[in-house]
Amino acid sequence: MAASAISVDGARFSYGEREVLKGITFEVAPGEVLGFLGPNGAGKSTTIRMLTGQLRPSAGSVRLFGRDVVRARSEVMGRVGVSFEEKNLYPSMTGEENLRFFARLYGVPHADVRALLEHVGLETRRRDLVAGYSKGMRQRLMIARALVHDPDVLLLDEPTDGLDPVSAQAVRDVIRARVESGNAVLLTTHDMHEADELSHRVAFINEGEIYALDTPEKLKLAHGRRSVKVRLRDGDGVREETVELDGEAAGARIAELMASGEVITIHTAEATLEEVFIRMTGRGLA
Amino acid sequence: MTTRRTREFFARGAPTREPSRAGIVGAIVAKDLLTFSRDKLWMVLTPVALVFIVTMFYLMPPRVDETLVIGVHPPAMAAALRLAMGVGDDQVALTVVPFEDEAAMAAAVAGDVPEGAPRPLIGVSLPIDLLLRARLGQSTTARVYVDAAVPNEVRGAMTTAVREVAATAAGAPLPVAWSADEFVVLGTDRAGAQIPLRERMRPMLAFMVLITESLALAGLVAVEVSQRTATALLATPARTVDVLLAKGIVGTLLAFSQALLVLVVTRAFGPGWGVLLLATLLGAMLMAAIGMLTGAAGKDFIGTLFYGMVFLIVLMVPAIAQLFPGSAAPWIQALPSYGLVEAMTGSSVYGLGFGDLAGHLATAAVWTAVLFGLGWWVLGRKLVTL
């Protein structure tokens, strides 16, 4: 694996007496997406704010490109693109003006913002005030803003939250394209399907602790239950039966059902990341 | 969505160059001015406030009418009263209007005068046999009518003047003689050249503009905080100090430019223009500090307005006190805006320079630095804890 673009080692952070991060450790390599999964209040956004240098860890280290984020904030932030959960754009400015402003902050005043707007499907609305944008358009503009300086690292906090399927897919396509070009991406989400689809590895975070960090496949295999769902004719109706594959009698039961001649369909039923998360942490993602 | 153009964008990368601190601050300032210019509330309120303030100035009379009109009845006593009060025919500061009828004089003092005729503020009704009784050493009475607005000291002066008429008539010369040489005026003699109210209003008018723009900055800051755009700014190479500096510049720029406009339009710049310019700049910085403080405290327009008014009413007190010379309580001198107002008044009204107003300017500079530091710290804390 290449040298880590993001490296967090034993980071802790407290809001007053309440410790919201309890020594988390993870790394993200270039060209990799790490899905950061957890319910609201788990510590995902706090982690993002530490990675942008806005919060200083009380213990441990947070590094980007091998450099301490707090000490070298100005230098490293020029190579990081961030999309926040809040759509914190300037509503009284146009989409193009928003991008040009941030381009100046990143020291790229001549960036081809129109190409970016085209990339996220907003080229025709570039002169409209953001106040008139839909939620999906704002989210796409947030992604464009994160890319305006062609960063090496992307920190994306719930990038598809509340979007319609078409807009969500458009955002996912942009993320995939950036990963192919070598970006390291930290993706915080509580959409398990999205995490499964985009992430090379996922970290389960709950109450400030990382419970598990591995590829989605390994997590599902290690902590989920494998089964098949069989739909059968039952007189005039239909019934469904689930056969656990990890049981000793699984093979015999499936053979028995197939021999009955009543099988209509048979589907594998893998554990979902959400089921694994619930099993490991004892709580859901809402 | 990936086109040739976007492929090229990512293939060549953004044309990076290290952002300079000045470049970052300049970008935030330009952005703030753009968003300010698109805020319909301020785009209406600012010109309305400017026009209102300038109109108020020019509606005030440009000169102070120092003429005191006194009615006297019967007309035969007018000459004696003139003599007693030392009024020559060529003097306009005091006009004695004779009345044939006491009731007509009383009505005139109450405001019932023919158009174009002078209205007496005081009417003195003397008995027709005053001089005779005075010579015989007999006591008599006189009646004085005064308009409700006539101050007590003028009423007292009239009583004294009537007694003086009687004493002179009785052949008892007054023991003290006045001559022009012995009447010593300390300081600039403003007799015949009083400072009109509108001149003394200038610091208050300038403060009204500064306050308006302080609220505008507070609004910009509050929006930046409540919409969390400040968080987005601080996830770029921009540092907290860059954002604070930009806010300070925007607030000072907005307040200074508009206060300057009002001062120019009201022809405030005279011999003490340098002091006035510096005092206005300090005032603009003071108001920018208040804008940062209230913007950090208030969550929306109403919130910033509430917190802003708490500060601004207090800061207005010295400017209001300028309208009533001699009325200011000593504690007013402890207010942060006192030095500023004194410097503005001294330079714009009396044409004083740096030598005369150095103390007030120094006080104003210290207060501005203290409040600017406080605003900087409070807003800085707010930004990093968003």
Image (cartoon, helix red, strand yellow):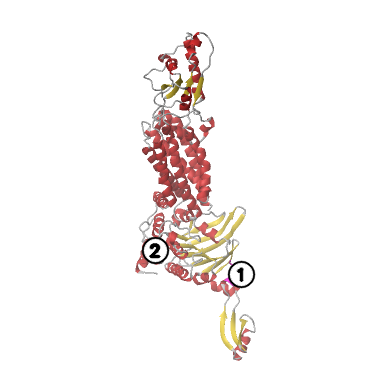
Q: Is residue B312 visible?
A: yes
Asked which secondary structure carries label 2, the reply is helix
Name which quarter of the figure residue A224 lies in.
bottom right
What kind of residue is marked 2? Arg
Q: Chain of mark 2?
A: A
**Residue position for label 1:** A278
Is B94 left, or right, of B329 in this rendering?
A: left
Residue B324 is situated, as x and y percent measured from the top left of the image, at 48, 31
As for residue A285 lying within the magenta part, the answer is yes
Q: Residue B55, image x and y in percent?
A: 40, 40
In the image, which is nearer the foreground, mark 1 or mark 2? 2
- The image quadrant that residue A46 belongs to is bottom right
Are labels 1 and 2 on one chain?
A: yes
Pointer 2: residues within 10 angstroms few (<14), some, or many (20+)?
Answer: some
Of the pair A27 and B247, the residue shown nearer to us: B247
Classify mark 1: helix, strand or loop: helix
Residue B272: image location, x then y, percent: 38, 31
Quarter of the picture holding the N terminus of chain B: bottom left
In the rendering, at what x and y percent does residue B43 appear? 41, 49
The amino acid on which the numbered mark 1 sits, given as a three-letter code, is Ile
Residues B55 and A52: in front is: B55
Circle 2 sits on which residue? A125
Is residue B276 a member of the stretch shown in magenta? Answer: no
Q: Which chain contains the residue that carries disc 1?
A: A
Which residues lie in the magenta part?
A274-286
